[in-house]
Image (cartoon, coloured by chain):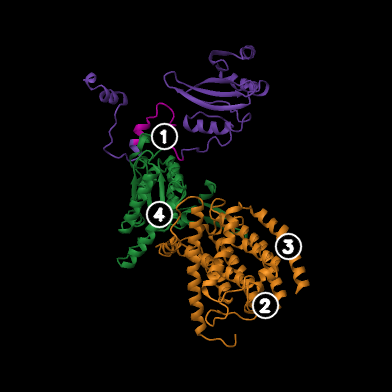
Chain colours: A orange, B green, C purple
């Protein structure tokens, strides 16, 4: 952080803008694909944009208190925080964001930060469904966090660094150098953790409209909901970029990055269309029963090998 | 909440003080809705377009006509391609489809839900029951004219209208919104006293605040 | 089935036995006999299912008729038990101790006809009508059309046709004139 240049802020804002659009488009396209699989025509691929504009343009909104305001802001901070501290394009001067030598630890904090902020906000909303949704959400995110942390520890052991840039640099020079090939078990563990944090079936009981009406954001509307939607396009993309960086060799230009983002995102979509929804106790048990032992084995093997 | 919890009473606080509690005044906001004048700019036109193309319906089946909304989600009719989606909570929805007859008991819940929606909001009245009572016109418990209680943007006649006519109705609603005529929330705020008077004439045990924020 | 009725007749005063089908019969019993009869049917004759419990308003006779329809799934038979109550002071013993669901029926009957069932759970609470101030609406002396016109702001310009006259005019125009 010694060579901080103010112009970096502009680059970071620009990359946020790009990733925000990618997120919205992927949301729309994935829903379109889902509809086509179900033999429906499906929404227009730009529908998420319209919904977002509509939500920001509602004339009235009511508040339940200070934390109700801050909840969505914290959530968006979590999403942006993840994104701002990981390098986007390897070797590019412009799209390094604010990565530094210990960024992966900070990113882990930011992944959890949004959920906590949302819990405070939804709690002040006062709706019983929000409270149920948030308690479910926190329990599930905590359970899914364990394999994620183990996977990142494994990465740190393998590459002997906490810097995403160095991890990406170590994977350059062809597909054979990617973590996916050099340490496949670790990648599997990471992808399992990825499923748990994507809010898609089978781990979508928190937000599922049929379970408890919509979960934590039950009371959120107009601009508040708009901020949450903005976050829902940025946060999954930021996580996906992180996974591209640490498991799939990073990207040297935007085109490769978008292809990789799309493919990794589709992994969660494929799992979602195949597997039905877990109840929250089932999903937590699943993470402790299968992901945690897998994590222990992976850490052991990684320590032995590297 | 039990009904007796809403009555005015004295309660003893944990430190021994006695205070008067009037839940209808203390727990709920009694403020009336405000009129939000729409802008006249081109930007407002753009926003109206966005509002028209993203209709979020409240998933509240108020009468028998709710059965006609279900096919709209299926592959055959697929309302999602017109930007119509269902939301499970009134806070996030803009369109209230009154599906068929309304009994007085349901009307109470409908008013509560409608007032919790955020403006601009639209009411689609489905079926002839909402127009003049339909086949329940002389019933002791169903209302005859919906427009006395809520500002209706568009009526879809029929008993019951098919899903196709619902889709046509939504297209008409979109046209109205794009012309800037979907100002139901403002009309409700303007004629608030008249609407409230009508509602209270029907709902005899009024046990909620005048405006449910 | 016939033997069953004979057995019941020994213990209870049963009048007006109407055989609807071979396995469906309606009996009329005295008000005091009804609950013991239903209890015996439920406990000893396997009529374990309360199909419906409803009332009819015989305005001219000044009576309410309660009908309990019970079903026996073993021999596939139904028995309807009719009880005539005085219209002025309509009151009946509750059977919610036999079937929990009966409490809901009784709550509805209390609201719609004004028949009282002392001791039935939540029988005084409003069921469908909240804050009803008129006489119970299912009583035949309640004029629902007048009430609707008075209360619900009818839309003017509504015309009604008598279906029989209308179809006659439409199908056979020469006959109707």
Whether residue C123 can be seen here: yes
Q: Nearer the viewer, residue C153 or C90?
A: C153
Q: Is residue A15 above or below residue A37?
A: below
Mark on residue A162?
A: 2
C-alpha gap between disc 3 and disc 1: 70 Å
Front-most of residues A260 and B12? A260
Residue hosting label 4: B82
Crowding at dot 2, Cα within 10 Å, few <14 / some 14-19 / many 20+, comes out as many
Q: Residues within 10 Å of mark 4 (few under 14, many from 20)?
A: some
Chain of the residue under label 4: B
- The residue shown at (51%, 33%) is C108
The residue where tag 3 is placed is A294
Q: Whole-Å distance between the Cαs marked 2 and 3?
A: 22 Å
Residue A18 in the image, given as x and y percentages of width and height? 48, 72
Q: Residue C54 placed where, x, y %?
A: 51, 27
Horizontal arrangement in the rendering, residue B180 relative to residue A252 (left or right): left
State the separation of the CA atoms marked 3 and 4.
Answer: 46 Å
Q: Are marks 1 and 2 on the same chain?
A: no
- Between the C-alphas of marks 1 and 2, the distance is 77 Å
* Residue under the image location 35 percent in, 38 percent down: B133
**Depth order, front residue of A152/B158:** A152
Front-lying residue, A62 or C169: C169
Q: Which residues are magenta?
A: C130-148
Find residue B146 and name its label.
Answer: none
Which residue in the structure is indicated by mark 1? Answer: C134
Q: Are marks 4 and 1 on the same chain?
A: no
Q: Secondary structure at mark 4?
A: helix
10 Å crowding of disc 1: few (<14), some (14-19), many (20+): few
């Amino acid at each position: 952080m010694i060579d901080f240049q103010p112009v970096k802020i502009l680059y970071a804002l620009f990359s946020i803008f790009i990733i925000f659009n990618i997120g919205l488009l992927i949301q729309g396209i994935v829903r379109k694909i889902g509809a086509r699989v179900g033999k429906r025509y499906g929404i227009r691929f730009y529908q998420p944009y319209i919904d977002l504009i509509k939500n920001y343009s509602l004339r009235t909104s009511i508040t339940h208190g200070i934390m109700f305001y801050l909840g969505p802001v914290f959530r968006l901070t979590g999403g942006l925080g993840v994104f701002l501290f990981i390098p986007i394009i390897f070797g590019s001067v412009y799209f390094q964001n604010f990565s530094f030598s210990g960024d992966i630890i900070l990113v882990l904090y930011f992944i959890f930060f949004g959920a906590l902020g949302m819990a405070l906000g939804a709690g002040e909303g006062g709706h019983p469904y929000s409270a149920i949704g948030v308690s479910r959400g926190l329990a599930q995110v905590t359970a899914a966090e364990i394999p994620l942390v183990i996977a990142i520890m494994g990465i740190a052991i393998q590459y002997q660094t906490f810097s995403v840039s160095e991890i990406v640099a170590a994977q350059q020079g062809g597909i054979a150098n990617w973590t996916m090939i050099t340490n496949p078990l670790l990648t599997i563990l990471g992808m399992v953790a990825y499923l748990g944090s994507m809010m898609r079936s089978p781990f979508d009981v928190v937000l599922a409209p049929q379970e408890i009406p919509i979960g934590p954001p039950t009371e959120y509307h107009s601009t508040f909901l708009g901020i949450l939607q903005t976050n829902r396009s940025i946060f999954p993309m930021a996580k996906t970029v992180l996974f591209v960086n640490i498991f799939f060799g990073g990207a040297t230009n935007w085109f490769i990055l978008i292809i990789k983002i799309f493919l990794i995102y589709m992994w969660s979509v494929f799992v979602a269309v195949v597997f039905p929804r877990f109840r929250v106790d089932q999903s937590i048990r699943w993470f402790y029963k299968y992901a945690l032992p897998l994590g222990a084995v992976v850490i052991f093997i990684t320590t032995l090998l590297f | 909440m039990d009904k007796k919890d809403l009555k005015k009473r004295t309660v003893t606080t944990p430190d021994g003080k006695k205070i008067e509690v009037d839940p209808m005044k203390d727990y709920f906001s009694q403020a009336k809705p405000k009129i939000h004048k729409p802008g006249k700019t081109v930007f407002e036109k753009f926003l109206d377009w966005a509002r028209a193309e993203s209709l979020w319906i409240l998933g509240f089946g108020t009468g028998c006509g709710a059965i006609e909304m279900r096919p709209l989600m299926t592959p055959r009719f697929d309302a999602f391609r017109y930007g119509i989606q269902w939301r499970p909570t009134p806070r996030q929805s803009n369109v209230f489809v009154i599906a068929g007859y309304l009994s007085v008991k349901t009307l109470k819940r409908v008013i509560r839900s409608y007032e919790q929606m955020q403006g601009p909001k639209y009411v689609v009245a489905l079926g002839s029951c909402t127009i003049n009572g339909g086949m329940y016109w002389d019933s002791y418990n169903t209302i005859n004219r919906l427009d006395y209680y809520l500002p209706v943007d568009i009526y879809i006649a029929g008993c019951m209208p098919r899903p196709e006519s619902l889709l046509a109705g939504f297209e008409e609603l979109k046209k109205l919104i794009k012309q800037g005529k979907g100002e139901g929330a403002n009309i409700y705020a303007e004629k608030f006293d008249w609407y409230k008077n009508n509602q209270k004439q029907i709902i005899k045990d009024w046990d909620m605040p005048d405006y449910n924020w | 089935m016939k033997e069953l009725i004979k057995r019941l007749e020994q213990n209870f005063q049963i009048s007006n036995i109407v055989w609807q089908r071979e396995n469906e019969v309606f009996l009329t019993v005295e008000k005091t006999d009804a609950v013991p009869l239903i209890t015996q049917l439920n406990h000893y004759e396997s009529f374990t299912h309360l199909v419906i419990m409803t009332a009819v308003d015989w305005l001219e006779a000044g009576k309410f008729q309660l009908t309990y329809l019970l079903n026996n799934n073993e021999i596939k038979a139904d028995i309807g038990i009719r009880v005539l109550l005085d219209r002025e002071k309509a009151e009946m013993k509750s059977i919610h101790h036999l079937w929990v669901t009966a409490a809901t029926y009784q709550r509805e009957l209390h609201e719609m006809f004004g028949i009282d069932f002392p001791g039935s759970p939540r029988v005084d609470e409003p069921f469908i009508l909240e804050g009803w101030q008129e006489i119970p609406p299912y009583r035949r002396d309640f004029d629902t059309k007048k009430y609707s016109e008075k209360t619900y702001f009818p839309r003017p310009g509504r015309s009604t046709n008598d279906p029989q006259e209308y179809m006659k005019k439409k199908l056979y125009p020469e006959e109707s004139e």
